[in-house]
Image: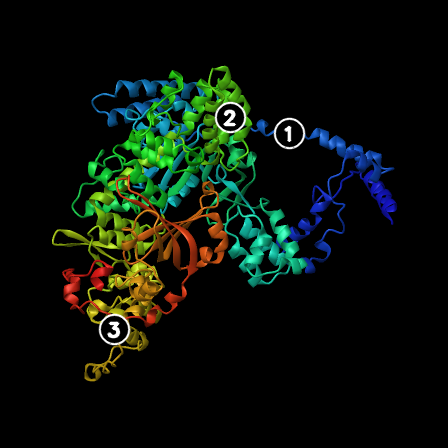
Amino acid sequence: GDDRRRLRRLAEMAGAARSRLLAAGGVRFHQPERRRLADVLAAIRLGTTIDALGLEAAQNAEAHLKPVAEMRRLFAGLEDAVEASLDITAACRFSLRELRYEYPEEILEPGLTAQQALEQRVRTAAARYWPESVPEKVARQIAHELRLVEKLGYAPYFLTVHEIVRFAESQKILCQGRGSAANSAICFVLGITAVPPDKHELLFERFISEARDEPPDIDVDFEHERREEVIQHIYDRYGRDRAAICATLIRYRGRSAVREVGKAMGLSEDVTARLAKGTWHHGDGGLHEVAREQGLDPDGDPRLSMALDLAEELQGFPRHLATHVGGFVITRGRLTELAVVTKAAMENRHTLEWDKDDIDALRMLKVDVLGLGMLSCLRRGLALIARHGGPSYGLRDIPQDDAETYRMLSRGESLGVFQVESRAQMNMLPRLRPREFYDLVIEVAIVRPGPIQGDMVHPYLRRRDGAEPVTYASPELEAVLKRTKGVPLFQEQAMQIAIVAAGFSNSQADALRRAMATFRHTGDVPEFREPFLEGMARNGYSRDFAERCFKQIEGFGSYGFPESHAASFAQLVYTSAWIKRHHPAVFACALLNSQPMGFYAPPQIVRDAAENGVPIRPIDVLASEWDCTLECDGGTLALRLGLRLVSGLDPKAADALVAARPCRDFATLVRRARLDRRAVEALANADAFRGMGLDRRRALWAAAGLDRAAPPPLPLFAAAEAAPSLPAATAGEETVLDYGATGLTLRDHPLALLRPQLAALGSVDSRAFASLRQGQRVRLAGLVLVRQRPGSAKGVVFFTLEDEFGTVNLVLYQHVVEAHRAAVLSARLLLVEGRLERLDEAEVPILHLIARRLEDRSDLLDGLHRLGGPALQPPLAHADEVARGSRPMPHGSRDWR
């Protein structure tokens, strides 16, 4: 009611200050309908509920954007305030293009320009790699690249990345560049990438192009456990005022939206937890249906219904800024002159409040310092080979073109191997039957949503097997697609098809590349449809063929690999596969010491090693280090499980235990290592005192009587209390305790103990499953190892189940998933009824169980501890035998039975 009086008073105050009054709307949302969501976001921000929001809630829905005419009506009589706001708006014409980015200068050699320094380093490195003479093809490529780098002024960028890689090499940190940088001969000779330019035909213009007005982008993977050393080196070298990691915008997804909106709306924690659990991932819609499946009634509860509506509305909203996985921006001057820099939540990290796309748009130098677990694993593996009498290999020194390695991959034996360990890759390997390195490049790229959605996989396999003729629509397309038998599998090929067949200019082709590369924005690629189809029609291609070509290109809009990226990854595929084939104990040991990584947990890694002939020795306080180790036994390397697998054991306590050895007496060892009761009980639960003659129960009894502060007894009174007669544990109890204490067991597999009950339910085991005929209906039970729901699978879910004899791949179509959502989400032990799908054309049979009905039988695991008679134990060895490593130990669950 007193608006006019208040506005006149504000105008008088502005006049007294010789300033102009500004008309503003106090805008909080763009449309009135968003008022409810704005209140919910305010409650989330303040950590309260909408009921307690008070004056922080919007008074009404008027705080929305209004047109100029409406603002003039609202501020009638104060038209000058509206005009003043418009004047300020008109004056805001700043463009981010006005920011001038400059490369850092530290990487220059004394007395040389950046280009001269780069050319000198390249010549020296090339002569070192090819001591006799640089191949003519490579020399031409290097000269071409150096000319283009000089013309575009990118030499400082290459020198900066090379400096970071040289630091890593000096600290013996494994690293390898990937992405489009693998197209560069310069990057190869400088040691940034590992794809030899004399063996692969890669397109440098995919990396740097005169037609593109953007700097190159080099991604370098470092050992994930030592990447922080590289990050801190960059900060130390360039200063925290000149170097920062760019940000990543985190958005609300299904689960986060449900949890936070539910809390703000006052829903109870158990309700929000059930809703979040029922939301498979961010792509799910229909939260009302999820609520009904969880036993809730949104139709009868208006507050719950509104919370679900608001949670769906909130999905996709920005939630917070996080630190990018490794995108470093480095400048010559102060970075704060360009953008806001802030301390990150992680200690000794500073971040830029711009994300990757902003950096690219501003043409700012960015080096992706990424972490890769497989590099940590390979570094450990190569060190173990050298430590146990083998050569000192580097990443480039592994013997190439090893037939046995390719035969192993052709059998689908790739557990733990980089990039090809998923069930989909394991099924593809026997069909593709890789025989050379380029087959691995294909393998990495072909099991991706892009090729799958573009219907490229089956045509390529048929043509490779000779079941379908290799044809090309024109000589121009033959030149583009010859290496992939007429089927486009890589982003570079899609770009070249657009140029040679559809008549795209370089700039149009690059725009298409951007649309394909940015697979988060799936709506971009269809914009090129009509120009592409019209261009192919002008060049004489049929409409049907053009449609098929564009469908394949659309597949890359979901996720497709550039060939250079696939080639970089294929190097690591081959290296890890070679170690697995020729040094299985080394590979398993390195994998276990690099956890967590990959698809598989320690139980599967240990089981795979045992099946490959590696003797497995249990955790032992007299022999185990913190990491898993290798022990030589008659020329064979055995895998000794490490103390790192003991749940609840602190690494410092483990180090103290190792330092206190050798010692054969329980009490003396505990006292020397100053182990507290918690550490001793963790070791006892892991059955780690068995080498001392104490089984799990006797060790726990001894731990219960510990008093570390008490002095050792005088000799006269040293007679020990007689050990009680403890009942023997059942086989089931030992297995349960093994899993609880270490996450794995060397005794019976849980399903071996449950087999009589499962057989009574009509379940076959995986061994019998493998012998069934195509289409046969079957029931099978297994522990759930892996759940996968690829975005390209149209709602299909893939499971991997395990029993005592092996694994089974499960396919769940969408209607089965919806009908058995609770079992799909939470079952530990699954009983499945379905039909066998069998393909015998590959190197080894490829088997799937097409599920029709699921039953969660996790309850059987809860009673596992009661099963079996007294557990069969290995003999209680004398301590000196354990110390020598000569005691024969079982190497698999079958031996323990």
Query: Whole-percent x and y of residue 668?
Result: 23, 72
Q: Is residue 65 left or right of residue 501?
A: right
Q: Is residue 421 left or right of residue 273?
A: left
Q: Residue furthest bottom?
A: 716
Amino acid at dot 1: Phe
Query: Whole-percent x and y of residue 716?
Result: 19, 84
Image height of 768 relative to 759, above or below = above
Image height of 74 relative to 622, above or below = above
Give how far apart the Cα atoms at labels 3 and 1 are. Answer: 79 Å
Using the image, tell me which numbered label, if any, was put on residue 94.
1
Report the front residue among 556 and 196.
556
Evaluate whether residue 113 shows in this view.
no
Secondary structure found at label 3: loop
Secondary structure found at label 2: helix
Q: Which residue is mark 2?
A: 511
Amino acid at dot 2: Ala
Q: Residue at x 47, y 52 (%)?
A: 817
Give how far apart the Cα atoms at labels 2 and 1 are. Answer: 26 Å
Front: mark 2 or 1: 2
Amino acid at dot 3: Pro
Residue 297: name its quadrant. Answer: bottom right
Q: Which residue is mark 3?
A: 870
